[in-house]
Image (cartoon, grey):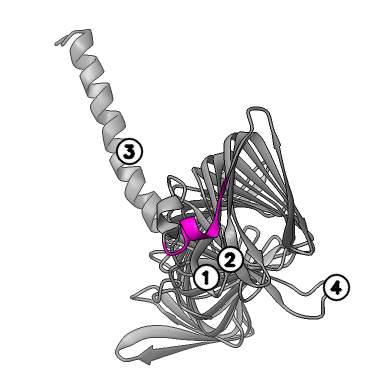
């Protein structure tokens, strides 16, 4: 009886499907097979009611791409697992794992290392008290006293997970990363690194510190804390801090919602309601604010501070006159420093400068100057003279007019405030 071409095609499909269903279990069974390549001696025994064999001396077995070597092993036949002793070593391609003792589970192609575990791959070395490698997933997990080191940095944490194919890593608990090139150390509770995209992120009370001792003989530390720290290592290496950012370097303190640090260029950009405070001396303090603030360092020392957009600068004048603040406002204010002392201030576009005058330690009125551009010159960090260009207007207010009424003369936008202390949840390491 001729069923026609459609019926024949259906029988062909069923035949192929049956063959596939028969082959798949056979392949799965074959994948679970462990091949004993060598052992100096083999002894059959029963352990807790399970048939096993004891392997001693130069033990070597393989399973697919996995190769395991050790000095002693017990192979449990029913559960398809192998207890490893005598410094077991495992290879999977370029990945090499060593432990004091371990377990290998053939059904899942999973290996565990105990007491002292080390993994080497390319230029990276990982050490921990416990490790587990999942060959099928190309994933490794480590716990307790974890350290990961390459030629760029060293990372320590409580737990660490590595995804080989994705080249992605996750570290948790007391994470600390110290870079060898730039003396930069990053702290936090949770870290993720995406090597393929050259991006990483630290959360859980994160902060970073950069310590410099060059030439001074004393520590000079830059610290930045925030809700999230991100690292970008593309064309320009930079660190980004977000959410309640707090910056400190010597007498300079800053707050912002967003901070970008260019590690090679030695500079910082602050955005989202940034404020910067610095002290020339114990008596003289300064505050800067604007839409954005660019801080340029030279050999870790202040070189320039550029405040852009609604720029405002305030400084205290005399401890005997706590209500008096020198003030400047404009679209842009640039501070120039020499040996961390102010050398010059330039105020551009709708520039306004207000400076209190003193004679023999007593108040002597106040000058207010406006113009398209105002430059203030300093000597040894002290105000020396002022230059104004284009559309200049000046006013002098005598002492008797301003005494006890200083608040009435403050410039529009005046907002003197004290810096907030760093987040108490930020952990000291």
CA distance for labels 3 and 2: 97 Å
Question: In the image, is residue 169 part of the stretch drawn in magenta?
Answer: no
User: What secondary structure is found at the residue carrying circle 2?
Assistant: strand
Q: Nearer the viewer, residue 162 or 368?
A: 368
Mark 2 and mark 1 lie on one chain; the one further toward the N terminus is: 1
Q: Which residues are magenta?
A: 396-404
Q: Nearer the viewer, residue 100 or 74?
A: 100
Residue 235 percent coordinates (x, y): 68, 40
Q: How many residues crowd around disc 1 within 10 Å: few (fewer than 14), some, or many (20 or more)? A: some
Q: Nearer the viewer, residue 267 or 359?
A: 359
Q: Residue at x 27, y 23 (%)?
A: 12
User: In the current view of this chain or complex, which residue is farthest to the front?
Assistant: 400
CA distance for labels 4 and 2: 41 Å
CA distance for labels 2 and 1: 8 Å
Which label belongs to residue 113?
A: none
* Mark nearer the viewer, 3 or 1: 1
Where does label 3 land, which residue? 20
Residue 412 percent coordinates (x, y): 43, 45
Where does label 2 land, which residue? 363
Where does label 1 land, which residue? 321
Where does label 4 land, which residue? 215
Whether the residues at callouts 3 and 4 have beta carbons within 8 Å, the answer is no
Q: Nearer the viewer, residue 6 or 107?
A: 107
Q: Quadrant of residue 278?
A: bottom right
Q: Residue at x 76, y 80 (%)?
A: 218
Whether the residues at callouts 2 and 1 have beta carbons within 8 Å, the answer is yes
């Amino acid at each position: 009886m001729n069923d026609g071409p459609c019926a024949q095609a259906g029988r062909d499909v069923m035949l192929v499907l049956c063959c596939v269903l028969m082959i798949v279990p056979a392949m799965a069974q074959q994948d679970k097979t462990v091949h004993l390549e060598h052992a100096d001696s083999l002894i059959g025994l029963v352990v807790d009611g399970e048939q096993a064999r004891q392997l001693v001396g130069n033990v070597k077995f393989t399973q697919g791409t996995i190769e395991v070597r050790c000095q002693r092993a017990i192979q449990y036949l029913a559960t398809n697992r192998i207890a490893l002793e005598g410094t077991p070593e495992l290879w999977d391609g370029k990945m090499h794992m060593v432990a004091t003792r371990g377990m290998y589970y053939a059904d899942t192609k999973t290996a565990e290392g105990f007491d002292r575990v080390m993994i080497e791959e390319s230029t990276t070395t990982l050490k921990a008290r416990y490790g587990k490698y999942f060959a099928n997933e190309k994933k490794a997990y480590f716990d307790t006293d974890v350290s990961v080191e390459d030629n760029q940095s060293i990372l320590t944490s409580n737990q660490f997970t590595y995804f080989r194919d994705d080249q992605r890593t996750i570290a948790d608990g007391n994470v600390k990363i110290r870079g060898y090139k730039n003396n930069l150390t990053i702290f936090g509770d949770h870290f993720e690194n995406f090597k393929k995209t050259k991006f990483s992120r630290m959360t859980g009370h994160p902060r970073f510190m950069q310590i410099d001792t060059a030439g001074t003989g004393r520590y000079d530390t830059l610290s930045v804390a925030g809700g999230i720290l991100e690292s970008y290592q593309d064309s320009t290496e930079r660190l980004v801090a977000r959410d309640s950012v707090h910056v400190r370097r010597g007498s300079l303190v800053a707050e912002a919602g967003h901070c970008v640090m260019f590690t090679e260029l030695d500079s910082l950009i602050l955005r989202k309601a940034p404020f910067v405070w610095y002290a020339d001396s114990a008596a003289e303090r300064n505050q800067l604010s604007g839409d954005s603030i660019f801080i340029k360092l030279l050999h870790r020392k202040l070189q320039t501070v550029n405040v852009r957009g609604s720029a405002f600068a305030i400084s205290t004048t005399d401890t005997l006159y706590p209500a008096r603040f020198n003030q400047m406002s404009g679209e842009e204010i640039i501070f120039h420093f020499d040996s961390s002392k102010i050398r010059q201030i330039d105020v551009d576009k709708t520039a306004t400068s207000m400076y209190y005058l003193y004679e023999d330690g007593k108040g002597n009125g106040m000058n207010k100057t406006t113009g398209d551009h105002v430059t203030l010159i300093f000597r040894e960090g002290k105000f020396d003279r002022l230059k104004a260009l284009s559309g200049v207007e000046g006013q002098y207010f005598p002492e008797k007019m301003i005494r006890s009424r200083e608040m009435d003369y403050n410039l529009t936008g005046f907002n003197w405030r004290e810096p907030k202390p760093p987040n108490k949840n930020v952990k000291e390491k």
